[in-house]
Amino acid sequence: MNAPTKVFIGDKHVGGPLARSLEQRRVRYYLAMVVLDVAILLAAFALVEMAYLGRVKLLEGQLLLPLYLTLALYTPTYSIRSLQDWRFAGRTALAALALSAALLLFVMFYAKATAEFSRVIFTGSLALSAALLGASRYALTRSIRRRWGPSVTNKLLVLAGGPTIDWPNAIVIDAAESRIVPNPGDPRSLDRLGRCLLNMDRVVVSCLYEQRSQWSQALRAAGVRGEIVTDRLDELAPIGLSVEDGWRALVVSTGPLGLRQRVMKRVFDIVVATVALVVTAPIFLATAIAIKLEDGGPVLFVQRRLGRGNRFFDMLKFRSMQQTHSDFAGVRSAARDDDRVTRVGRFIRRTSIDELPQFINVLRGEMSVVGPRPHALGSQVGDKLFWEVDRQYWDRHTLKPGITGLAQIRGHRGATDEKRDLTDRLAADLEYIAGWSLWGDAWIVVRTLGVVAHPRAF
């Protein structure tokens, strides 16, 4: 990752912008993408028709082309991100191709004109078009990176007494040294600022809290996308802005999933938990007998944990430690060769069998199959409780805790000896919450089957 470019402007630079405009260059590349797409689609149909028929008619290609271009223009197929990320560019182009092909077939079917189509030619041409579109996006983004570097936008970071931040590939200026003052009552100072902001696609100002109003007004007047960073915002960690009649508010929480998403997730939980309990019933019985025969103590271990909305619930596990050494507070994490763990317990912990009773918690509605893992109340990193290490810890309780999760399939489990052991799994939990989808849950369940036995499970 490239480091920010530090630039200080003095009097002799005030008369001109800090960077050349990239907008016209981006437009040229967008036009090149359109021309290339047209050539690829027509060439693909022509080549397949020549190979199959020995002649070129381009009927299907001419019908498909306007549909493809229309969908591409109304989707991010031709966007800034498509100039930077070849995978995104390829996905959006292929999505536009697939949708336009489906729409064309739908129209031709209802027009009863499908007899005019050759399935072999249409399918072969689509396959060749898809391959060529993907290759062209890869070549184009590589060419742009060689010519422009890692960014296709001009970004400016103005340091004006606020928090110190790092913004890769941005031009950085110091407001004090450059004598840039957002003074609405001084046209000359606004002219000086306006010249600095010329050709910038995005401007971020890190200023003192007391200066936010002046900078906000100056950025709006400059006609650029402007953002302000202040130290007091860090205390609230806002994720957006809410605008109502006559007032505005910082959004600090989006709340739970919507009703439709919650119903989908609950149905998924019930189905998976029911199937899991039926399939693992013999394992349940064998484990219960083994635990009872080893020391005669209770089969289940019940521990109070925090669930959704920071509400307590009793989590179930097969008991894996000696009854007299069970850690109900969860202050001491199990370690390798832990003398508290029984022989049966060592096996069921290593194979994650001890977690199976939590499917009962799922059916009760206290847990989900997939979600952030519930931690014991006394869990610590060093001598600090989890929530003392990172305030965002509480944010993970937006959803029900899960038997497995994104952190678990990434290998973030076991003892938390270092701060990173917690922050890595916390980052994965928050990523899961922010991007939840039903397909994502299914994918995590499938991936979990490959990490049931884990070297960090003691």
Image: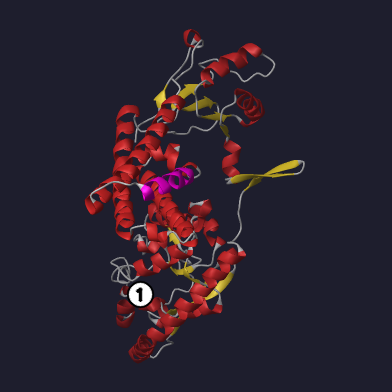
- Residue 211, quarter of picture: top right
Residue type (three-letter) at the residue carrying disc 1:
Ser
Q: Quadrant of the N terminus?
A: top left
Whether residue 44 is situated above or below residue 208 in the rendered picture = below
Q: Magenta segment, principal secondary structure?
A: helix
Residue projecting furthest to the right: 246
* Front residue of 441 and 238: 441
- The magenta span reads 59-72
According to the picture, the residue beneath numbered tag 1 turns out to be 352
* Front residue of 246 and 418: 246
Q: What residue lies at 30% left-to-right and 33% top-to-bottom?
A: 143
Q: Is residue 206 magenta?
A: no
Asked if residue 447 lies left or right of residue 274, the reply is left
Whole-percent x, y for residue 239 in the image: 57, 46
Q: What residue lies at 24% left-to-right and 54% top-to-bottom?
A: 52
- Residue 442, quarter of picture: bottom left
Whether residue 385 is situated above or below residue 449 in the rendered picture = above
* Front residue of 168 and 52: 52
Whether residue 174 is situated above or below residue 75 in the rendered picture = above
Q: What residue lies at 44% left-to-right and 64% top-to-bottom?
A: 439
Whole-percent x, y for residue 85 in the image: 37, 41
